[in-house]
Amino acid sequence: MKKGYRIKKNEEFQTVFKKGKSVANRQFVVYILEKEEQDHFRIGLSVSKKIGNAVKRNQIKRYIRQVFHDLNTDIETGKDYVIIARKPVSEMDFHQVKKSLQHVLRLGKVIKQ
């Protein structure tokens, strides 16, 4: 995932939280904010220290980035996404993470069936 596709600054995260809409399932909460001036999507990741040690949290973030990389053509552009991982993610492998993220993105109507 290129650096231009990531949300890094706290102000950008806060804007998505305040102005965006949220969808959730048991494993993830996704905040979605429309940005018409953008020609691609950006993602921000939040994995709490409650989920596991640094190795586990970084693994989860790599899984999420890989899912977005795999679904690159299916995800709507011109939006910012902030993904918050919940506790059950720590026991999931990549394929379960992908299935769960696809589910929550379908709930948000931002992924093509």
Image (spheres, rainbow, N blue to C red):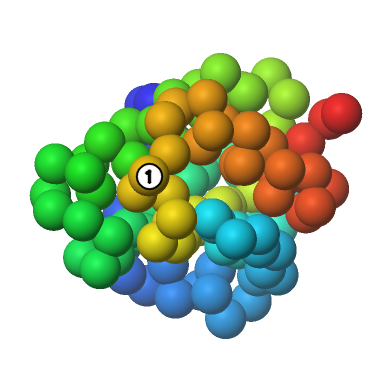
Residue 65 shown left or right of residue 26 in the figure: left
Furthest residue toward bottom: 18
x and y, in percent, of residue 20 in the image: 65, 70
- Neighbor class of circle 1 (other Cα within 10 Å; few <14, some 14-19, many 20+) is few
Residue at horizontal 44%, vertical 62%? 86
Compared to residue 51, the image places residue 59 above or below, namely above
Furthest residue toward front: 91
Q: Is 88 or 68 nearer to us in this picture?
A: 88
Compared to residue 77, the image places residue 7 above or below, namely below
Residue at horizontal 32%, vertical 69%? 10
Q: Hey, what amino acid is under mark 1?
A: Glu
Residue 80 seen anywhere in this rendered image of the structure? yes
Image quarter of residue 92: top left
Compared to residue 77, the image places residue 24 above or below, namely below
Question: In which quadrant is the N terminus drawn?
Answer: top left
SS for tag 1?
helix
Residue at horizontal 66%, vertical 63%? 24
Residue at horizontal 21%, vertical 44%? 56
Residue 42 shown left or right of residue 54 in the figure: right
x and y, in percent, of residue 25 in the image: 66, 59
Q: Is 75 or 89 nearer to us in this picture?
A: 89
Image quarter of residue 55: top left
x and y, in percent, of residue 90 in the image: 35, 48
Number of numbered labels in the structure image: 1
Residue 23 shown left or right of residue 13 in the figure: right
Residue where numbered disc 1 is placed: 91
Question: In which quadrant is the C terminus drawn?
Answer: top right
Residue 39 seen anywhere in this rendered image of the structure? no
